Amino acid sequence: MQKEQLDFYKKWFHDYVAGFYADDEYVNANLKLKENHTYSVCSQMAYLADKLNIGDEDRLIAQTIALFHDVGRFEQFAKYGTYNDLKSVNHCQLALDVLRRHGVLNELQERQSRVIKTAIRLHGQKSLPADLDQDAEIFAKLIRDADKIDIYRVVIEAYKQNLVEPDRLKLEIEFPDEPSYSRHIVEAVLRQESLDYSQLRTLNDMKLMQLAWVFDVNFAETLLKIRQHQSLEQIVALLPRTDDINLVARCVFDYVAARLEKNG
Ligand SMILES: [Fe+2]
């Protein structure tokens, strides 16, 4: 794969997304959110590829995955008015449909398009399957990590805006914003388990699930970025101050510290 191919993909993506903007401000704001998220994930992917000394060919593949990982989001929002997969479609699968319908990956070699499709398909799953194709594994891990770094930024911005001007919030808040949280979610985080959306009941449950994402982070370099952005601290500050939450915070921070220490 050549750099020119990636340049072509960047232009294709830009033009494809531009076609979804119309005169509805709410829709446009939501589309912009995912377009900006895509470009930020491309930057985080470049950071990880540098830190992990990924070779030139694989770096271009990784960049292509970052660029297209959420390409299904635009059609999803235009059609269903939501980014909630449970209420609409699996956006990872939809990304593959979009790429296939437009023949975007047709020029690539078999190995290239195979690992790109596998990484995109798996990027939003609760965890990676045990029998994952070895060739695709590094890419699936990279996109899941790059994505998490930036999703923290996106959700923290939304939570903060929700506090000060909830009426102007662009992002749909999918769960009731009430002071409570679910005991089974707290317990799952303390057991260092990954959670998925179907287990959540309140907005605080969602914040707790997002704290538990760190247990699924693949690379120490990702944890470094998350620590640098103070993402976990900011989410904890947006949760009620209770003994449960203090325990969860301790568990998550200790986990990150131990992993970073192990990594030197
Ligand atoms: Fe996604």
Image (tube, grey):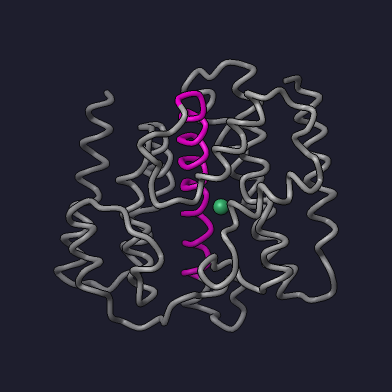
Return the residue nearer the eye: 145 or 166: 145
Return the residue nearer the eye: 93 or 258: 93
Would residue 129 appear left or right of 146 to someone viewing this image?
left
Region of the chain picked out in magenta, as a range: 134-160
Check if residue 158 falls in the magenta segment.
Answer: yes
Q: Is residue 113 above or below residue 211?
A: above
Would residue 148 appear left or right of 17 to someone viewing this image?
left
Image quadrant where one finds the N terminus: top right
Check if residue 64 falls in the magenta segment.
Answer: no
The count of marks equals 0
Q: Determine the residue positioned at 28% across, 80% down.
A: 180
| Image spot of residue 207 (x, y percent) | 36, 65
Q: Quadrant of residue 28?
A: bottom right
Q: Quadrant of residue 255?
A: top left
Q: Determine the residue positioned at 52% across, 31% down.
A: 139
Q: Is residue 162 above or below residue 215?
A: below
Q: Is residue 167 above or below residue 147?
A: below
Q: Determine the residue positioned at 14% across, 69% down.
A: 243
Would residue 131 appear left or right of 256 to someone viewing this image?
right
Q: Quadrant of residue 60?
A: top right
Q: Determine the residue positioned at 25% across, 53% down.
A: 193
| Main secondary structure found in the magenta portion | helix
| Image spot of residue 174 (x, y percent) | 49, 75
Would residue 175 appear left or right of 80 to someone viewing this image?
left
Image quadrant where one finds the C terminus: top left
